[in-house]
Amino acid sequence: MSEILTGSWPLGWSVALFLLAGLLTVVGSVRLATLGDVLADRTGQGEALFGAVFFGLVASMSGIVMTAVSAADGHPDLAYSNAVGGIAAQTLAVVAADAAYRRVNLEHAAASLANLLFGCLLIGLLALALMASFSPDVTVLGVHPVSPVMVAFYWGGLRLIGGHARPMWVAVRTRDTVPDRPHAEEATRARRTRTLWGEFLAIAGAVLVGGWVVARAAETFVQVTGLAAGFVGAVLMGVVNALPETVTAIAAVRRGAVTLAIAAVVGGNCLDALNLVVGDLAYRGGSLFHAARTDQLFLTASALLMTTVLLGGLLVRQERGWLRLGFDGVTLILVYAATVAVLAF
């Protein structure tokens, strides 16, 4: 049993378990989209805040476990690449959700001040991570000083986003804007809120176990195949890390919960940025930020660029655009494809 938990896995088993964990994540995420929409209405939190915080936390659990396991096993480059690579892959989930929402460009329909502010919060967190990588290599009790700063920055951002009852900026309402209103609960009306929370947390636990499996399988990929840790962490682990947000965003727009779709992606990205803090705590070889190599820093810059493009799309609110995706969707595809190409070669 201990060999399964800590030892190296055969490549065949690693591939099979990797794919199984990804499938489990997809199935669980479809159900999470429904539960998240209903609980957002029942708790009165709204799709943007609930999606970015509660759902974002659950969707990010697999990524948190991947980063922690990789860092604790002495693979800081894998841990860092997974966290930041997940952000890049998850931002691309907006394009998938936009393609599934055919009425109008998704960024136009999901106009929300909260989503814009979460994008700004993400840029700030990624900038702090970059500053840490270029700062003096200093740790306190094995943790870089920027780790608690990032947690405080995130907490302050949540207080700022949730504390404006009368915002000074609002999106112009159009006929295609979808307001965040409670939806009819035909399938869940008879079920108590406590029961729904229980199912929500149970699925979260399954996603968490899946994250551990993916991390252990990825370590085998690096050791056996000779693939670069940056590529495995950013692309293979990053894509699986992004599956909950991608599937949920698509499922949410099909339910008409367009604000939840954007919030799940951007809010989940903010929590993935905090994965770097988790990795820094788990890594015993010094600061995770200073263990970052060129590939990891390149990934961070790519995630910053993709977040900026997404914010531009939310501000411009293009109704119809290039290839029916909008300028931001096409640009996100190009940036991500170029990032993967650079990491592969």
Image (tube, rainbow, N blue to C red):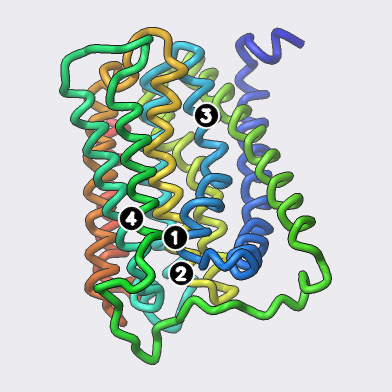
Comparing labels 2 and 4, the label whose residue is closer to the camera: 4
Label at residue 259: 2
Going by the numbered disc 4, the residue's amino acid type is Leu
Comparing labels 2 and 3, the label whose residue is closer to the camera: 2
Q: Residue 153 versus residue 323: which sits nearer the camera?
A: 153
Q: In this rendering, does residue 333 appear at all?
A: no
Q: Which residue is mark 4?
A: 160
Crowdedness near tag 4: few (<14), some (14–19) or many (≥20) residues, C-alpha within 10 Å: few
User: Total number of numbered labels?
Assistant: 4
Q: Which residue is mark 1?
A: 263
Q: Which residue is mark 3?
A: 66
Crowdedness near tag 1: few (<14), some (14–19) or many (≥20) residues, C-alpha within 10 Å: many
- Mark 2–mark 1 distance (CA, rounded to whole Å): 6 Å
Crowdedness near tag 2: few (<14), some (14–19) or many (≥20) residues, C-alpha within 10 Å: many
Comparing labels 1 and 3, the label whose residue is closer to the camera: 1
- Mark 3–mark 4 distance (CA, rounded to whole Å): 30 Å
- Mark 1–mark 3 distance (CA, rounded to whole Å): 22 Å
Going by the numbered disc 2, the residue's amino acid type is Thr
**Which residue: 62% across, 50% down?**
26
| Disc 2 and disc 1 in contact, CB within 8 angstroms | yes
Vertical relation: 245 (above or below) 75: below
